[in-house]
Every structure is written in C-alpha cells, then in structure tokens.
Image (cartoon, rainbow, N blue to C red):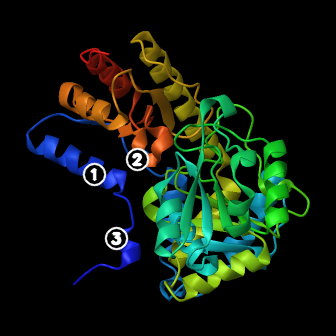
Amino acid sequence: MEFSKNLKSLPPYVFIELDKMKKAAREQGRDIIDLGIGDPDRPTPARIIENFKVSVQKPANHQYPIGRGSRVFKDAVAAWMKKRFDVAVTDKENMCLIGAKDGITHLPLAFINPGDVVLVPDPGYPGYTSGALLSGGKIYPMPLIEKNNFLPDLKAVPSGVYKKAKIMWLNYPNNPTSAMATLEFYKEVLSYAKKYNFIVAQDAPYSEIYFGEPPVSMLQIDGAKEHVIEFYSMSKTYNMTGWRIGFAVGGENIINGLGKVKENMDSGTFTAIQETSAWALLNCDEESESIRALYKRRAEIFSKGLKGLGYELLESKGTLYLWVSVPKGYTSMDFCEKVLAEADIVITPGIGFGKSGDKYFRIALTVEEDMIQKALDRLKKVKI
C-alpha cells in the first residue's frame, strides 16, 4: 500500500536516524555517551510525584478527560501566565495539550489549506515542517544566522510570500541555537502579522530554562492575542517529558481552531496528570529554579572545556543545548559520524534542523558533570 503524497514529502526525522546509529554502536558493545536528544536525565521532582500518588487514586480522574482541559488545570495555567508574564488569559484562551508537540503539529490542520505558506525558522524544530507538510502547506524557510543574533530577517521575506502566509513559527529561547528574543523584536513580528493577517505561533517549551534575564511573552504586547498562540510545556521546566502534558495560550479564535482539531483526534490528557501539573505550576517554583541552575552550571563547564579543545561555540543563553561550529572541512553529518566512530559520543548534526544549521552541531546538556568531563576527555581523540 502506497503512502500518501503528504507523508512521502516528510524529510527524515534526525532523531530517529541518530537513534539507529546509537543502537548499532551499542550492539557492538561500545560504551556510548548520548548527547543527542534533549531528554532530562534527572527524575521528576519528588514533590510532584507524591502529589500524583494522591491524584491518581481519585476515581473521578479515571474517566475520559474529554474537553480542552480540566477546570483545575486551566485555572492554574491562567494563574501561572499572570504570575510569570502579567498576562491575563480567559478560559477560552487556553487549553491543555498532550505535550507541546501535540499542539505544534496539529495547529496547521486547523488553518492551512493546500498551497498556503508556513514560515519556518531554519534551523528549527522538525515538527514545524512536518505539521505544515501533512496539512498540504508549503514551507518557506527563514534563515537564522549569527550576524542577526539568530532572529529571522523579517524584511528579507518577499511581500508575495507574506500574502500567502497563514502561520509564522518562532521559538525562543531557541532550539538549537539557545538565542533569545526581545519584546521589541516581537512587536516588529506582530506588525507584519497584522498587515498580512497571519498567525504567529511561538513555541516556548524552554521558557523557564534561561541563564540571564527571563524570556518575555508575545502576549505582553497590547492587541497580540488576535494573531498569537504560544505553546508551553511541563517537560523541561519540571523534568516531566514522559508525562506528556503542556498547554497553549492565545487568541480565542486560534485556540478554538486547534481545539476543534484535537476534539476529533484525541481524548485529552489523563486528568490525574492535569491535576498534578496544575499543582506544580502553582507550587514548584523552587524545583524549577533548581533545574534551571543545573543546566546553567553544565553549560558553563561544557563550554569552557570545548573552548579549551579548540571548538568555537556560542554563549548559551538558555535551553538544554550548546550550538557548536563544525570544524572546517566537514559537513555537520560527517563530523557527527566521525565523533561517534572515534569518541563513542552521539551529538546532533545541525543539518537535521535545516540547511542553515549545517555549519553547526548541537550538544544536549543532559548528563551529569562527571560524564561531561568524560565526554571532553574522549573528544581529545577527535582531530579537528
């Protein structure tokens, strides 16, 4: 049976390819250090787990979690947005997600018709592209380059492209570059969205993993809601990747479109997880601060060590990653294969995030300090 044209249009998912390479190496008995996928290595904080033990025993939480989120979860989201960004969102302006990826890949199904344009950062998270292509949309890449502080050059996009655009994806703090965006930049983005009438979709799963000034929300701008939806996640903030829960906030019409898609695609997130996540949003700032400090410390240690080995890299401003220049003479995939072969380390080639990423590779800060030092020692074997 032949796959659909939309499915066949999807590029290879870099993390799947990396996983195949890693498994093959381990089957050979090699001791692999995995710095590829950004999955927190430490467990969910104990207080969150203890709260879940209570929530999971409530019979009322065992039924279908039909709807766009439980009352307790949606109220907690509204309270968190007010506390964190001083942004007020109503019940109709927020919804629960089965992780941020759920919302990211389903949003285009609500608004994209065949031939519509989706503006995608390059490099960028592969889900922006896959969701658009599965909806029949056309991708227009927005290069993120160092001289522009890894912000898209909004003036470089032709007016004819803007006229066909339905969604522009942004992602700050940025994966994979760790760049940050300012409120002034967001105001400029919003001026284009209003002029050409498209949605700005801000993917913000790393909103609480920052090493300097806290990131801002586009919804802090007056009048932004009509054009903006933001995606947040419990995954990185509270080490809850496996729990699969996040939320979207934004204009009522945009939330309603995404909600209609999801009501026809799934039955929501387990209510006990929603209840515990609501409690975490309101009560676990201390845990979030501890997780943030952990990644800042790891970024400092790894950055210093890599520079000592002759690598060029950007100062990490947040996220779980370092964005490192590939040595001259290599593509990002060639160099990552070389590192796996010579040092038994998995790193992510920048090409997996788009053409503009091919001069870089990404390191995930998801191992303890002793393993960071072990990885640095192994990298000494790799001639650059």
> Which quadrant holds the C terminus?
top left
Identify the disc placed on residue 8.
3
Compared with 133, 109 (above or below) is: below
- Secondary element under disc 1, as helix, strand or loop, is helix
N-terminal label among 2 and 1: 1
Q: Foreground residue, 163 or 277?
A: 163
Identify the disc placed on residue 282.
none
- Give residue 8's position: percent from left, percent from top: 34, 70
Q: Foreground residue, 340 or 143?
A: 143
Q: Quadrant of residue 361?
A: top left
Q: Residue at x 45, y 32 (%)?
A: 360
N-terminal label among 2 and 3: 3
Q: Which residue is mark 1?
A: 17
Do the residues bearing badges 2 and 3 touch, measured as CB atoms within 8 Å? Answer: no
Q: Quadrant of residue 160?
A: bottom right
Q: Is residue 72 left or right of residue 89?
A: left
Q: Is residue 107 left or right of residue 355?
A: right
Identified by mark 2, the residue type is Gly
- Secondary element under disc 2, as helix, strand or loop, is helix
Q: What whole-number distance in Å separates the C-alpha atoms at marks 2 and 1? A: 10 Å
- Give residue 61's position: percent from left, percent from top: 53, 82
Q: Do we see residue 237 in this rendering?
A: no
- Secondary element under disc 3, as helix, strand or loop, is helix
Identify the disc placed on residue 352.
2
- Give residue 264's position: percent from left, percent from top: 53, 89
- Give residue 131's position: percent from left, percent from top: 50, 68
